[in-house]
Image: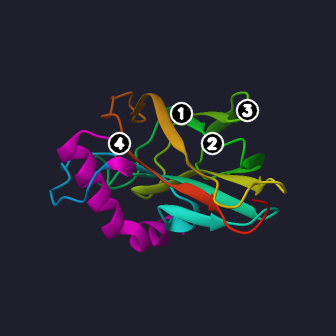
Amino acid sequence: MAGSHYTAVAAWVVTLVAMAVSSGVEVGAAAPVRGAVPVDTLLATALVEGVEEARVQPGQTVSLPVVLDMTGVSGVGDLGSFQFDLFYPARILRYDSMTIGVSGAASENGEEPGRFRFAFAGTEVQGSPVITLVTMHFTVHADAPAGESSYFDLRFTDAPHSTTFARYPMPRVVNGGVRVVGGSG
């Protein structure tokens, strides 16, 4: 399943990562440019429905997979630890639950409205270079106004490490967002 997510957005993600790498500005604010993604790059995505801005309706349940592509550093997903915070638009979304996608010890470290903290440690490789770390499940607030939009903000609080404690580079992150269609407004 993680591989199909990557395939579906691969060209789009490579374009966005190239934009961020070559321009040094926020991905959502950059104008498209062409460029190569460095070979030793880790790529993390937080995209609802695999698109930059998912259209959602009040009351709708949405899932946000957080995916890490380790192809540039490990063909077998040698992931020993990571920790991230994901900031989400609490005025639009209510956090409901999560589904852990990695094998090892993982935990939610105190969700608060608008912020989700997650940590992982493991001693075995994941078996694939493209890994769904966790899928977060949200419900769009029933009173979310039409036209309201916001982006997620995925931040690794430390660089991921291999199972042998080797430090990887900080992941390049591509954040998606949501836009409310229908509802009050």
Q: Report whether 170 appears left or right of 90.
A: left
Up the image or down, 42 lies above or below 140; here it is above
**Residue hosting label 1:** 84
Q: Residues within 10 Å of mark 4 (few under 14, many from 20)?
A: some
Secondary structure of the residue carrying numbered label 1: strand
User: How many numbered discs, if any?
Assistant: 4
Q: Quadrant of the N terminus?
A: bottom right
Secondary structure under tag 3 reads loop
Task: Report the Cα–Cα distance between label 1 and label 2.
Answer: 13 Å
- Badge 3 is on which residue? 111
Extreme residue in the left direction: 35
Other-residue count near label 1 (Cα within 10 Å), few / some / many at <14 / 14–19 / ≥20: some
Q: Position of residue 162 (x, y in %)?
A: 39, 36
Disc marking residue 88: 2
The part of the chain drawn in magenta is: 1-29
User: Callout 3, which amino acid?
Assistant: Glu
Q: Is residue 160 shown above or below 35?
A: above
Residue 126 has which mark? none
Residue 17: image x %, image y %? 29, 52
> Marks 1/3: CA distance?
12 Å
Task: Give the amino acid at mark 4.
Answer: Glu
The alpha-carbon separation of the residues under discs 4 and 2 comes to 16 Å
In the rendered structure, which disc, 4 or 3, sits on the residue that comes first in sequence?
4
Kind of residue sitting beneath label 2:
Tyr
Left or right, 146 with reference to 31: right
Residue 10 in the magenta stretch? The answer is yes
Q: Is residue 177 above or below residue 108?
A: below
Residue drawn 27% across the image and 61% down it? 15
Secondary-structure class at tag 2: loop
